[in-house]
Image (spheres, grey):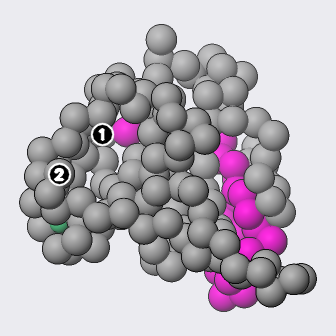
């Protein structure tokens, strides 16, 4: 499925091919919440990085999350590159050099109509803000950290891969 996306101000437009376009993966981690999740979570899709085409690339900035280990106090920087529009601040996509063939656009930046997922995965609930009440359907899966099932594996299990 071809996905088209853009930031709010229109300075950045992008497109990519995605075999995994269902917006089922709700991440409640503090990074997603602060940078992309006004409702307490952000939703990532899966796509193929070598199909990513960007117009207005000069307006795209990258944030790599700065993290502090709660136990040791040690500081680190996440290798994941969160791309956003430097003019309007819209979160656009995540690219991680550990999985260079993949790209993870935020569902919120996509203009193409996305399919409605039959069930959802709620992840990083251990980091959920206390004011966020989980809105989970009966078939939804819940994880305190990351699930073992990837975005691609979820689509395969439910027979929804757009091959
Ligand atoms: Zn913008
Ligand atoms: Zn997250």
Q: How far apart, in angstroms, are the residues tagged by discs 1 and 2?
A: 23 Å
Foreground of the two, 115 or 156: 156
Q: Residue at x 77, y 53 (%)?
A: 146
Magenta-colored span = 114-137
Q: Secondary structure at mark 2?
A: helix
**Quadrant where the image shows the N terminus:** top left
Q: Which marked residue is nearer to the observer: mark 1 or mark 2?
A: 2
What residue did someone put label 1 on?
113
Q: Residues within 10 Å of mark 2 (few under 14, many from 20)?
A: few
Question: In the image, 65: left or right of 91?
Answer: right
Q: Position of residue 145 (x, y in %)?
A: 80, 59
**Callout 1: CB less than 8 Å from ligand 1:** no
Foreground of the two, 86 or 43: 86
Q: Residue at x 61, y 28 (%)?
A: 152
Foreground of the two, 87 or 38: 87
Q: Position of residue 125 (x, y in %)?
A: 76, 67
Question: In the image, 147: left or right of 7?
Answer: right
- The answer to whether the residues at label 1 and label 2 have Cβ atoms under 8 Å apart is no
Q: Which residue lies most toward the top here?
A: 163
Foreground of the two, 94 or 158: 94
């Amino acid at each position: 499925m071809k996905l088209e996306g853009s930031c709010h101000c229109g300075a950045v437009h992008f497109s990519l091919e995605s075999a995994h376009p269902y917006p089922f993966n709700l991440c409640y981690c503090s990074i997603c919440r602060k940078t992309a999740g006004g409702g307490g979570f952000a939703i990532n899709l899966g796509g193929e990085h070598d199909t990513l085409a960007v117009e207005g690339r000069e307006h795209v900035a990258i944030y790599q999350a700065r993290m502090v280990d709660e136990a040791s106090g040690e500081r680190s920087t996440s290798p994941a590159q969160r791309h956003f529009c430097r003019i309007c601040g819209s979160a656009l996509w995540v690219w991680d050099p550990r999985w260079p063939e993949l790209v993870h656009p935020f569902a919120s930046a996509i203009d193409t109509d996305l399919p409605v997922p039959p069930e959802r995965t709620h992840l990083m609930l251990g980091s959920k803000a206390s004011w966020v009440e989980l809105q989970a359907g009966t078939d939804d899966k819940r994880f305190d950290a990351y699930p073992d099932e990837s975005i691609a594996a979820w689509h395969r299990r439910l027979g929804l891969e757009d091959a």
